[in-house]
Amino acid sequence: MLDLGGVEARRRRRRVRAFEAAVFVPVLLALALLATLFFDVITDSFSWQVIAPHNSGRSFAFAEGFAFHRTWENVVRLELLAQGRTPEEVDALLADPEARRLFAARNRVELMPWVDGLPLRWLVTSSRDDHVADLPLFEGVGRRRELLASAEPGQVVLLNAWLDWSFFLKNASRSPAMAGLLPALVGSLMLIALVILLAVPLGVGTAVYLEEYAGDTPFSRLVELNLSNLAGVPSVVYGILGLSVFVRLLGLGPVILAGALTLTLLVVPVVVVAAREAIRSVPDSLRQAAYGLGATRSQVVFRVVLPGAVSGITTGVILAVARALGETAPLLVIGAAAFVPRPPAGPLSPFTAIPIQVYNWVSENDVEFTHVASAAIVVLLLVLGVLYSLAFYLRRRYESRW
Amino acid sequence: MTDTAGIPAETVRTAPVPPEESALVITGLSLWYGGYQAIHDVSLTVPRNQVTALIGASGSGKSTLLRSINRMNDLVEGVRVEGSVTYDGVELYGPDVDPVEVRRRIGMVFQKPNPFPKSIYENVAFGPRLMGFRGDMDALVERALREAALWDEVEDKLRSSGLGLSGGQQQRLCIARALASDPSVILMDEPTSALDPIATDRIERLIDDLKRDYTVLIVTHNMQQAGRVSDRTAFMHLGRLVEEGPTDLIFTNPKHELTERYVSGRFG
C-alpha cells in the first residue's frame, strides 16, 4: 500500500511551514516599523492647544466660511465683523490692498478639526496669539473636557492640524504657529528639477556610451570600476567636493545651482547603473534588425535602444530623484541656509530644502516646532511615496514588454 | 568530423553560373574572429533572380558567410575579412564603401522573427524612415506588405503592435520590413527554424514569389527546404565551400563524398 501522507511527509511539511514563517518575520518587522514611523509623525502633526487669542477668539462653521476662490476673504470678513467693526469699515479695509497685505502678514486663516467643542471650524490666528498649553494628540483626547473647563474666559481650546493647506503657503517664521513649508518646498522642487536636467543627459549618455559604443577596453573598464566605487561614497564627501569645487572654485556660493550640481554627482552613478540595465534588457535581435536595415549606430541608439529602455531609465531616474530629495548632509556642507524667509527666486538664490528644514525645526527648543517638523516629515514621506509608487508602476509595465 | 581530412582543396562546381547571370560574386573570402578562422577562402557566385541555398552542419560557417555579404560581421569586435564580395561589379569591401549603405541595399531576415515593439505600420516604415523617405509612405507600406503576402491579414490593424501577430506572421512582417527598403538582394538566415510547418510552408511559397524581383540567398538547416525552394545549393563544411551547383544535381548526384553523406543524412 502506497503511503503518501506518512510521518516523514508530515514532518517535512511542518519544517517547510516553519521555514516560511521564519522568512516572513523580517517582513512583518519591517512593516511594523514603517507603520510605527507613519503613526508617530502623523499623530505628532496634530496637537491640542489652549491659546489666548489676539483676535476675537470666535470660530466659524466650515459652511459659513467656505467660498470657492474667496474663502480667505470670507473668513476675514466674519472675523472683522466679530471684532465689532461695521460692514462699511470691513468693506473699506478689504478693498485697500495695503491693509490686506498687513493683515495677511500677521494673521492666518486656518481650518481646525475641533474648536471649543465644535468640529471643523475656521479660526483666524495671529502671530500675537499667546500659546498657553500644547498637548499631544492622544493625551488631549481624554482631557478635552478638562481643558475646556479649566480654560479662562476668552481663551480658546482647539485641536490644531499643523499639516493643513496653509502649511504649504506659509513662509518661514520664528513662531511655530506662523512657520510654513513654502521656501523649503520650492527649494526642494527647484533642486529636483535641476538634478533631473543635469543627471539624465549625463547618466544616460554615460550608459549609452558604455553599452553601445565602448568595447571592452582598459578605459571603459576604468570608468565602470569608478562608477561602482562612486556609488558607495558617503554623501557627506560629495558635499565637501561640492563645497570646494562649485561653491568656492567656481564661485557660485551656497545657491541652488551649487546644491543641484552636488546632488547630481551623487545620483549620476545610480542613474548610470539603472540606465545600463535598461539598455541591456533591450534584446540584441532588435539591434541586429535595425543594423540589417542600414541604421547607423546613432540611429540604432535613438530609434531602437532608447525607446525600448525608456521606462527602465525613467524608473531609475525616479529612484535617484527620491534619493536626492531626502539628502541632507551634502546640502548642509555646501551651506544651505538655516533660515530662508521667502521661496528662492531662481537657481542662483540661497535656499533650503525640506530635509534641512526638518533638521532645523527639530533642533528648535520650542515644543511646538516638533509638530511643524512632523508635518514637514509627512509631506516629505508623501512625496517619496508618490515617487516610489510611480517607479513601481513603471517597472511593472516594462517587465511585461518582451 | 573535426579534422579537415577529405575536404577538397578546390570547390567542386557543377554547371557554373554564367557571368551574365551573376549578381553577387564572392571571391577568395576568408574571415577571422580574433585568432580563429571561421571561413577559409570561399568563392561563390550567386545568380540574379534565383534562390541560392547555403547548407551545412552547425558551425560550418554558412551564417557567417551570409553575414559577411551585407557586412553585418563588421559589428562584431575583432573581425578581420580578406577577399572580395562584389554586387553588379561593385566591390562591397572597397576602401570608400560605407557598410551602412551596403546594408541598406541588401536586406536581411533573421532566424527568430524580430519585429520592433512598434505598430505593424511603423515596423515596415522603419527602413524608409532611416533613409529619410519623403514620398507616399502609406503606399510603400502597402506594397511591402502585399509583396510579403501579409496585407490581407493585417490590412485593418496596421496600427496595432507587430508583437501581437503569430510567429509566422511576424516573420512575414520582418520580410516586408526588409522589402520596404527596396533591396536588390535578400539574405535569409534560417528564416523558418522557429516556425511550425504551416507557417513554414507560407514562407517557402513567399520565397518562390520573391525571386521574380529579388536575388535570394538562404541559409537552412533543413535539406528538404533547400530542395523545395532553391535553384542552386552550396554545401559548406568547417568553413570551407565543398561543393556547389544546381539543387537537383546536388541532391540526386553529389560529386563529393562529404556532400553525399550530408544530403543523405548520414551526418550533420
Image (cartoon, rainbow, N blue to C red):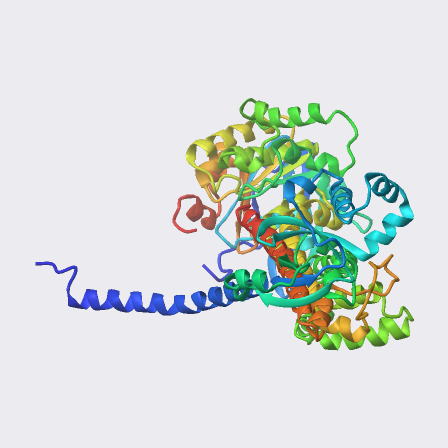
Is residue A205 at least partly visible in the picture?
A: no
Q: Position of residue A344 (x, y in %)?
A: 84, 59
Q: Residue at x 24, y 67 (%)?
A: A12
Q: Position of residue A326 (x, y in %)?
A: 68, 65
Q: Residue at x 48, y 51 (%)?
A: B57
As drawn, B201 above or below A356: above
Q: Using the image as rendered, state which of residue A313 and residue B2 is in the foreground.
A: A313
Q: Position of residue B136 (x, y in %)?
A: 75, 24
> Residue A61 vs residue A332: left or right?
left
Q: Residue at x 64, y 51 (%)?
A: A309
Q: Using the image as rendered, state which of residue B217 and residue B168 is in the foreground.
A: B168
Quadrant position of residue A38: bottom right
As drawn, A157 above or below B54: below
Q: Position of residue B80 (x, y in %)?
A: 69, 59
Is residue A49 at least partly visible in the picture?
A: yes
Q: How many marks?
A: 0
Q: Using the image as rendered, state which of residue B51 and residue A273 is in the foreground.
A: A273
Q: Using the image as rendered, state which of residue A311 and residue B262 is in the foreground.
A: A311
Q: Quadrant of the N terminus of chain A?
A: bottom left
Q: Residue at x 77, y 73 (%)?
A: A332
Identity of the residue furthest to the front in this view? A153
